[in-house]
Image: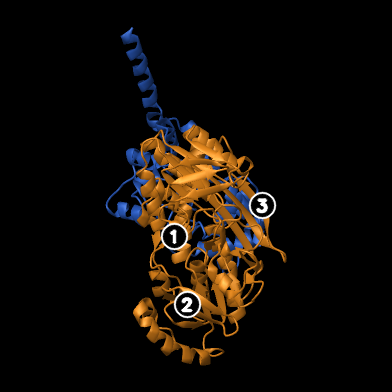
């Protein structure tokens, strides 16, 4: 019987070898795309992806840690990059398994993904945008979107950063102005639009956290814009 | 004249300081920078001092009076008892408030307030002038609240409701309990500091006993029929510490209690029990400086919800546990939230800065067992009558372990956040 199984495996390998995508080797990219939903409130990937709350992830495989121009990394990740850390599968796998264990001061407020298969799937999805970043699959640019739609009129409100500074004292009972993330995410230096989108996602009870639903629930559109304008320019 | 911080640091220099300072300060009233004195360096006072100093950008001279050089937060002191935190990790100093925010930090006791002259006298002999006074003294215990106990018995039967050496003592006593021994708690009546606090403490003590002394027993004598997060705690106790905890509520005689610190006995509704450790948490009242200032009604100091000003004297703001304000619980989070409203009101009164509508928030996290955290919270607004609850939430029984762990991790983040909001 053994030879039959071996032959079957050989056949699978042969099929893989003819597929240009690398994803089958490390996980299932289709399943990974579903997992990506949790990431995309902060990260963008795909055509035209820009840095948002987190850096864009086009070309993450092979990228030096902490090196994406224009993004403010934690000191720890920036240092790892200087020390020569290049993101490849094993390191990314360890990082997303437990981000804080990998880089204790990381600003990525993500609990980590314990399931090895799921990590492999997610990385398989991300790798589509790395091996050949210019070669974006046709159906993919949707992933650059955010997790919540906000009325463009609300996004267009220009916030008053001084008013935002006053309002921010309610936030800083929990969120540290240094941007440190010890179980509660840092919120400084976010692009204002991402801040507004996130707060409206709580206000509309689209994002589930009860404290944030309550806090955002009683902020007006102008107040959210003011907070976004203030926190965007706070330096650690 | 600027108060020289160093003069106040040592008790020996205090007499000299009094003579040097009192004369010029009388003349200083109405001249120069407006002066704010803050009494109490906890979640209310430290936050108020920091925000007034920070946001007035040097226009207001801020003096903070706090006897302790090392301040131990009450919040998270229960976690220390179970070994989830080191004592050093809940200790904070006032160095940054002095060096980065220019606050005069005076380590002394405030022992008198003259509301006419607007002065605070200190145990060391000095007198401080103020244009606005912020009182955030926390709690004191009501004399005679628990039959057989007064503060002279706090070594035999610790309260551990002001963190620091009392927390250390209670932890040491729990760890020294004989195998199968009995721990008793006398819980306080409402209102009191940190409504879930006694029950989180029970959880933490059960946690350490279940690991080191699993046949030990815990008895709680409670005058109340209900307590904060009751369903969450009771569910957690039955899941983690089944059979260890016996809660005797007010409807079963839990309020009819006396203790004997010499014999180490507790008598609940006529039934005497020999115990190994007894944690007595008596009924509470505003820190006694409020009484000395003559601004209390009953046990607490009533305030105007829009500004946290005393209802009796508009030059005094009262924060946190000591105040009676309406719907907010007495918690560190609440005091921190009230401090920001008061700081804004003080600045507006003294420098004409803009006054925005008061908003308040509170969240109380409690740990039930390893990685099993729960929370309750609400938002509030000021009405003319009281601080009124607007909206709230509470953890639910039956949440999965991952959510409970996230809630606990969130509380760790909150601790880092609020302590940097207090101490800079």
Chain B appears what colour?
orange
Give the label, 2 or 1, closer to the camera: 1
Question: Can residue B95 be seen in this snapshot?
Answer: yes
Q: Earlier in the sequence, mark 3 or mark 2?
A: 2
Q: Residues within 10 Å of mark 1 (few under 14, many from 20)?
A: few
Q: Are marks 3 and 2 on the same chain?
A: yes
Q: Are marks 3 and 1 on the same chain?
A: yes
Q: Which residue is mark 2?
A: B63
Q: Residue furthest right?
A: B384
Q: In the rendered image, which quarter is residue B360 located in?
A: bottom right
Q: From the top left corner, tell me how far across and down residue B111 is, in percent.
A: 49, 75
Confirm or deny contact between disc 3 and disc 2 (CB under 8 A): no
Tell me the SS state at disc 3.
strand
Chain bearing mark 3: B
Confirm or deny contact between disc 3 and disc 1 (CB under 8 A): no
Chain A appears what colour?
blue
- Residue B152 has which mark? 1
Q: From the top left corner, tell me how far across and down residue A26 is, in percent.
A: 38, 31
Distance from the alpha carbon under mark 3 to that under mark 1: 42 Å
Q: Is residue A69 left or right of residue A223?
A: left
Pick the front one: B230 or B273? B273
Q: Which residue is mark 3?
A: B391
Q: From the top left corner, tell me how far across and down residue B228 is, in percent.
A: 59, 47
């Amino acid at each position: 019987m053994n030879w039959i199984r071996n032959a079957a495996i050989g056949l699978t390998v042969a099929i893989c070898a003819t597929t240009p995508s690398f994803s089958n080797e490390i996980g299932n990219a289709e399943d990974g795309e579903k997992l990506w939903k949790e990431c995309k409130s902060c990260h963008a990937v795909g055509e035209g992806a820009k840095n948002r709350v987190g850096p864009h992830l086009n070309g993450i495989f092979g990228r030096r840690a902490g090196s994406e121009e224009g993004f403010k990394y934690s000191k720890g990740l920036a240092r790892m990059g200087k020390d020569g850390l290049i993101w490849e599968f094993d390191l990314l796998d360890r990082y997303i398994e437990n981000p804080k264990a990998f880089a204790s001061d990381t600003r990525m407020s993500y609990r980590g993904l314990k399931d090895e298969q799921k990590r492999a799937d997610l990385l398989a999805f991300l790798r589509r945008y790395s091996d050949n970043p210019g070669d974006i699959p046709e159906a993919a640019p949707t992933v650059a979107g955010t997790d919540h739609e906000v009325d463009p009129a609300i996004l267009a409100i220009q916030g008053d950063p001084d008013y935002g500074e006053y309002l921010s004292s309610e936030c800083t009972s929990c969120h540290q102005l240094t941007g440190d993330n010890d179980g509660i995410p840092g919120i400084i230096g976010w692009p204002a639009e991402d801040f507004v989108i996130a707060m409206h996602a709580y206000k509309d009870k689209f994002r589930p956290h009860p404290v944030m639903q309550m806090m955002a629930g009683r902020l007006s559109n102008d107040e959210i814009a003011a907070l976004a304008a203030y926190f965007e320019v706070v330096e650690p | 004249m600027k108060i020289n911080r160093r003069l106040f640091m040592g008790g020996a220099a205090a007499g000299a300081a009094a003579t040097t300072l009192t004369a010029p300060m009388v003349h200083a009233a109405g001249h120069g920078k407006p002066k704010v004195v803050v009494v109490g360096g906890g979640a209310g006072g430290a936050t108020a001092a920091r925000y007034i100093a920070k946001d007035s950008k040097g226009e207001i001279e801020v003096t903070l009076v706090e006897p302790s050089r090392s301040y131990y937060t009450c919040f998270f002191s229960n976690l220390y008892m179970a070994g989830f935190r080191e004592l050093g990790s809940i200790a904070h100093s006032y160095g940054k408030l002095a060096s980065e925010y220019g606050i005069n930090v005076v380590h002394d006791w405030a022992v008198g307030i003259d509301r006419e002259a607007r002065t605070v006298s200190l145990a060391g002999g000095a007198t401080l002038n103020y244009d606005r006074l912020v009182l955030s003294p926390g709690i004191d215990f009501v004399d005679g609240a628990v039959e057989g106990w007064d503060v002279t018995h706090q070594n035999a039967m610790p309260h551990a409701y002001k963190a620091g050496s009392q927390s250390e003592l209670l932890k040491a006593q729990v760890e020294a309990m004989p195998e199968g021994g009995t721990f008793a708690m006398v819980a306080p009546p409402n209102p009191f500091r940190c409504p879930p606090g006694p029950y989180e403490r029970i959880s933490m003590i059960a946690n350490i006993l279940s690991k080191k002394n699993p046949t030990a027993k815990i008895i709680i004598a409670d005058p109340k029929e209900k307590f904060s997060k009751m369903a969450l705690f009771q569910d957690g106790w039955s899941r983690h510490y089944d059979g260890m905890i016996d809660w005797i509520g007010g409807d079963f005689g839990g309020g009819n209690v006396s203790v004997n610190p010499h014999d180490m006995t507790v008598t609940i509704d006529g039934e005497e029990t020999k115990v190994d450790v007894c944690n007595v948490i008596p009924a509470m009242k505003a820190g006694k400086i409020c009484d000395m200032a003559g601004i209390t009604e009953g046990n607490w100091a009533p305030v105007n919800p829009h500004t946290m000003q005393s209802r009796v004297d508009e030059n005094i703001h009262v924060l946190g546990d000591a105040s009676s304000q309406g719907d907010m619980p007495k918690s560190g989070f609440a005091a921190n939230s009230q401090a920001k409203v008061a700081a804004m009101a003080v600045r507006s009164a003294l420098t004409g800065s803009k006054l925005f509508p008061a908003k308040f928030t509170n969240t109380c996290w409690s740990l039930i067992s390893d990685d099993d955290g729960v929370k309750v919270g609400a938002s509030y607004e000021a009405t003319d009558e009281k601080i009124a609850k607007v909206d709230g939430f509470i953890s639910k029984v039956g949440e999965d372990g991952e959510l409970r762990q996230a809630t606990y991790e969130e509380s760790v983040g909150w601790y880092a956040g609020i302590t940097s909001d207090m101490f800079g």
